[in-house]
Amino acid sequence: MARIPIGPGLRRAALAACLCALLVPPAWANEEATLKAAIVFNLMLYAQWPAEPAAPATAPLVLCADANSKLWPHLRALQDRAVRQWKLSLRETPAGDVGKQCQALLVEDGASAALPARLGAGTPLLVVADTVRAEGAMVTLEMVAGRVVFDVDLAAARRAGMQISSKLLRLARSVRE
Amino acid sequence: MTGMPTGKGVLGRRLTRLALAASALALLVAGSVLNVALFLIAKQGLVQETTAQAQVIAANISAALLFTDVQAAAETLNSLERSPGIARATLTDAHGTVVADYRRAADGAAPVGRERPGATLDARLLVFVQSVQVSGGEIGRLRFEVPLDPLYRRAVVFGAITLAAAALAMLLSYLLAVGVRRDVDRVERRLDELAYLDPVTGLFNRHAVREHLIDYIERAQGRHGFSVVTLDLDGFKVINDTLGHHVGDEVLREAARRLLATLHPEARAYRFGGDEFVLICPTLAGFREPQRFGHSVRTALGEPMRASGHEMVLSGSIGVARFPIDGQSADEVLLASDMAMNAAKAAGKNSFSVFDARLRDATQHRLRIETELRRALREGELRLFYQPVVEAVSGGVYGAEALVRWQHPQRGLLLPGEFIDVAETSGLIVPLGGWVLEEAARQVVRWQAAGFDALQLAVNVSARQLRGAQLGVQYRSAIAATGCPAERLEIEMTEHTLIEDLDENMRVLNDLRSLGAQIAIDDFGTGLSSLAYLKRLPLNKLKIDRSFVRDLPGDHADVAIVGAAISMAQALGLRVVGEGVETEAQLDTLRSLGCDLIQGYYYGRPMDAAQFETWLRERRVAHPGAAARPPRRAAGRDSKVMPIR
């Protein structure tokens, strides 16, 4: 496992200035949830699913999240936005086999324990954890000094058959292999 | 001294210049096109290279921009350190705000332009703007500034290399041209030689004389001068005419060979034309003692020679002139030499003369006379005077001899001795003779109108008039213009004149005789006095030269000669005129010897028309009963004696 250090300049950068560069710039930018929702959305731009070449262009990209979470309303605002060739579709995390119905999964506080049981091994699913340490999470978001940083677990991604773009890796606080 | 002095290498030099100019032009055009093309290609390459780089950077930097990772963006831009061509790279977000700005040199941060995506070129800078996109949407822009200075530096280096290559090519071209020029020069020299050589003798020809003289004069500056010898072979025309041109050519070749053999090695010989040679001799001895040339040339020619089996001895008239004493230019010294030669020729055959300023004066005098004589002919300054011719026995007036005078506006009345020579040499004698004929014819008509209707008028003609049958034309024209009866207008010519071309002259004289003209031999006894031509020519009269009359009757030899001449003439049916009769004793002697006609001061000097008429009237009064002339050979004609009553 190697941690790729990210320079301190990144953390010092003004949040507001950075936000306006985002593809999905939230209008009410100073809220943590808004920012995190935008980052979750952007992460999907740099993830690659193994079935991607076969997936029809009109198919929705399903993001599953807990409807009671803090990010839910902000993610709703991104409903139907284009993620590369697909449209984002937000859905309540199902109780059954998550891997069958979701392409991406946001795990928030309190949902960690049940996660591995619901995932079939090798299921292609982008698992993003917000703050919590979730087993199988490929990207974990964290708030540091008013700025959202993330760590990437490449081993988890590889197990799931997911690929994370090197461009994203360069921006991660740490990458676990 | 070798080679020709002028015109050498001109063509070769021009060819060399032309070849070099052509090479230079070709190199200039090719070099310019190549350099411009190279510059444009390099510029395009720069744009392509920048485009590729911008696309790579844009792809790499998109995530950083999207996740607002300023440091990652700056690091990506910093990777451009390995691309020295890019002076500045700026990343802006979708709102145009600068996210990262990379500058190669830490200069002042100029404001960033807002160009549209793509390449924008000005004279100093290439600006390339690349859109940064994710999922087909633009999230920002990347702007590169690439200075064109390296491009210009490279163009300068290419230009310098082109110039060096061109210089090398020019050098090779020059070497080639020099080779060609050497050939051209050789051909040119050969052509020059052909143009400057006489094909008969192998000597230089007259074209070369002037060129060489100019060359000598250039080289003679500050040193002693040189001598120019002009040689005219005596009697060459006779050799050509009698033995044929091939013999003449052989004689010329032999003369050239001998001249070359006798010349100083530094001297040159030229065939100036016909039988005329010119020698240029730069030796000091010859310059100091020009008489040497006369001696050496005469000795060289004097040896008897054989040409085509004919043995002969050559001689020539030799003139010498020296540069710069006798002439300061090529033309002057050549003319001086020619004048000296002509003076030698005038002094007799096989003679020699060194130029003398008086010769030039004499020549200039002749030239002036020639000019004035032309004017005299034009302005009517010539006059005719008339000397009476009287019947020896009866004392009746037979007629007169017309003698030309020049009423010169400054110098007064001039005798023929002052200008006839010039007229002869200049050819003016022909129009002058024509004028005399016509004026004489007019006078005959005037006399007829005045009642003196049986006067004969004799006119002297020159050898030049006889040439080309001009005399016949002039005679006919004079008769036709005035209405003078042909039998009144007599022609007199000297023996010398007649025998120059006997056959041709006989034709002319027969023609005149057919018109009715009478023909007299003037100055009989001074020439060859060949009986053969007396028999052949259609003559009417002999005029016994004054030199035989002068010492009559005291000189018995003259009495014998005159008596014999008169007897012979009468035997041939010719009448005889005694010239220069001044005394009664001379008159009596001639009359007793049977002379028909008398001319001389005894009866009258040459007079102008008015005086002559007065003389006629007085004589008519003084000798009213002059007897009729003795019967003449041309019996049946009207009496030519003016009835004096």
Image (cartoon, coloured by chain):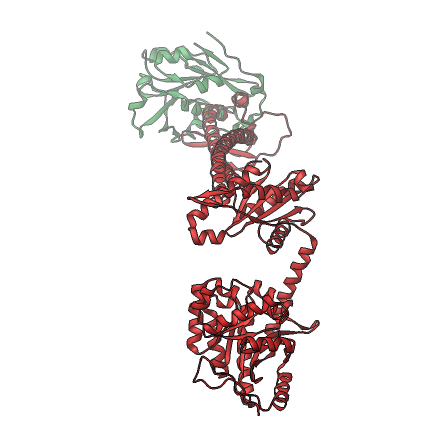
* Image quadrant where one finds the N terminus of chain B: top right
Could you tell me residue B431's position as x and y percent?
Answer: 54, 71
* Image quadrant where one finds the C terminus of chain B: bottom right
As displayed, is residue A21 above or below residue B440?
A: above
Residue B473 versus residue B127: which sits nearer the camera? B473
Q: Is residue B357 left or right of residue B174?
A: right
Could you tell me residue B546's position as x and y percent?
Answer: 60, 70
User: Can residue B224 be seen in this snapshot?
Assistant: yes
Could you tell me residue B459's position as x and y percent?
Answer: 54, 75
Q: Quadrant of residue B395?
A: bottom right
Q: Which chain's colour is red?
A: B
As displayed, is residue B182 above or below residue B480?
A: above
Residue B472 versus residue B48: which sits nearer the camera? B472
Residue A80 versus residue B22: which sits nearer the camera? B22
User: Can residue B383 be seen in this snapshot?
Assistant: no
Could you tell me residue B189's position as x and y percent?
Answer: 50, 39
Question: At 55% across and 86% down in the image, what residue appears?
Answer: B446
Considering every residue shown, the one lying at the far bottom of the view is B645
Q: Which chain's colour is green?
A: A
